[in-house]
Image (cartoon, grey):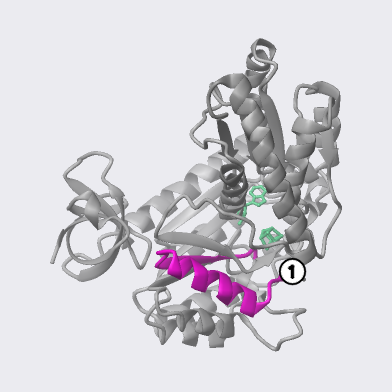
Amino acid sequence: MENTEELKRQREYIERLKGTVIRLKDSLSRTPKCAVVTFGCQMNARDSEKLAGILKEAGFALDGTESDADLVIYNTCSVRDNANQKVYGHLGSLKPLKKKNPGLKIAMCGCMMQEQSVIDNISRNYGFVDLVFGTHNIFKFAELLYRMYEESAGQIIDIWESTDDQVEDLPVERKYSYKSGVNIMYGCNNFCTYCIVPYVRGRERSRDAKEIVREIEKLSEDGVIEVMLLGQNVNSYGKGLDEDIDFSDLLKEVEKIDGIKRIRFMTSHPKDLSDKLIDTIASSEKICRHIHLPLQSGSDRILKAMNRHYTKESYLGLVRKIREAIPDIAITTDIIIGFPGETKEDVDDTIDVINKVEYDNAFTFIYSKRTGTPAASMADQVSEEFASEQFNRVLDAVRECASKRNGMLIGRVEEALVESISDNDPSMVTGRLSNNSMVHFKGDKQLIGSIVQVRLHTAGGFYYIGDMV
Ligand code: 5AD
Ligand code: SF4
């Protein structure tokens, strides 16, 4: 439920923070700077835009870096252990800076903070961290920041186990003027046995369709033409809402918003992808020709142990249906290698799926043991050496397919949303095609944020070169 009382309270705290920033400005003789450092997925990227929105509204400058900011915020990820280790690395390098400049404030939030072992570690070994909050109370950021500056001498740790509250409509500072992520649901109920997300993001909660549409209408008035609907499993959108609505229905509502030209979504769980959704994408002018469909493994035995609720055959059947209905769609995936008990034969099955689907791209991960998940206590953990050998086999298969797929659009004229000046050539711009491929072509910065027609004439490894027509 959206909580308007809480929204009002947090807005009041933003007003109070403005006084704090004026005080800091006086003592520093300049505007205090902050750095919001983001790890992990698109959900976290969106959360960071919310943090930045509040900071900007309160008067902070957003252009700080970890080495010169007066306030550093780490928005953390815990999906794999190396994400956790990275954060500790960053934190370690801030310690000497904090010694030199006691006015430096350090805040931490995001998925890692929902792990008890992390909280124990921070309170025991990282006393120089000023503020810690979690995924369920991120909307309290203004209040917590105010308390950190004005009321507290020691470390503030505020972690909630769960929440039913949704506090939207606080200020947001978008990274891009022309595109935006939009949360349509929070949390996950799937409990894949390797995954920590259900524990750190809580149970699945869908937002009211009307609220989502209202948010997107406002974004559109503000110049946004592409939205990415975000959820851990968008295909189960609507469950638990009073209104009888599913993800396809929501997409159709979003499609009606005039100013929105492109709609993307992330992530689709294969077990919940309906025929209705395939039809909706196929008949849509605005839904992009790209679907991210995490496979995780191609072996039935491993899929069962992962609690994924589909088989190799049913996954391949689903892909066939999608390709029949939407022939030019790009399909990307996530794959985990080295799950407990995985053998070379299981990986052969994964590679077989890669070759049959011909993914446009795949994100491959070595299995990382996450404390508290069922897979962490499975007996037959595989060796690092085996996992990395198999990882390389999978990576080779992925590269081969991706390079086969990239280039399929050569000769065609496609719409591209121009995103930036090209990194390598200031006389070129970089745009994104509906299928999520990048294209470089001659153009200038005036084009950024607009959709143009581009003839694709050459393909590089993962991109096209073209000419605007
Ligand atoms: N180890 C490795 N990869 C993981 N993922 C999720 N949990 C783990 C884990 N414990 C991957 C999955 C998921 C992606 C976001 O991260 O492939 O789709
Ligand atoms: Fe994790 Fe599975 Fe939920 Fe994705 S669907 S967030 S992999 S538990």
For image coordinates 53% across by 83% down, the residue present is 253
Q: Position of residue 104 (x, y in %)?
A: 66, 22
* Quarter holding ligand 2: bottom right
Say whether residue 453 is left or right of residue 257: left
For image coordinates 80% across by 54% down, the residue present is 199
Viewer-proximal residue among 314 and 124: 124
Q: Position of residue 390 (x, y in %)?
A: 55, 45
Quadrant of res 52: top right
- Which range of residues does the magenta coloring cover? 204-232
Can you say whether 417 is above or below 257 in the image?
Answer: above
The answer to whether residue 137 is visible is yes
Give the residue number, with chain letter if any, for mark 1.
2
Say whether residue 190 is left or right of residue 452: right
For image coordinates 20% across by 41% down, the residue present is 426
Q: Position of residue 74 (x, y in %)?
A: 64, 36
Quadrant of res 1: bottom right
The answer to whether residue 86 is visible is no
Q: Position of residue 450 (x, y in %)?
A: 29, 63
Identity of the residue furthest to the top in this view: 100
Secondary structure under tag 1 reads loop
Say whether residue 320 is left or right of residue 266: left
Q: Crowdedness of circle 1 by 10 Å Cα count: few (<14), some, many (20+)?
A: some
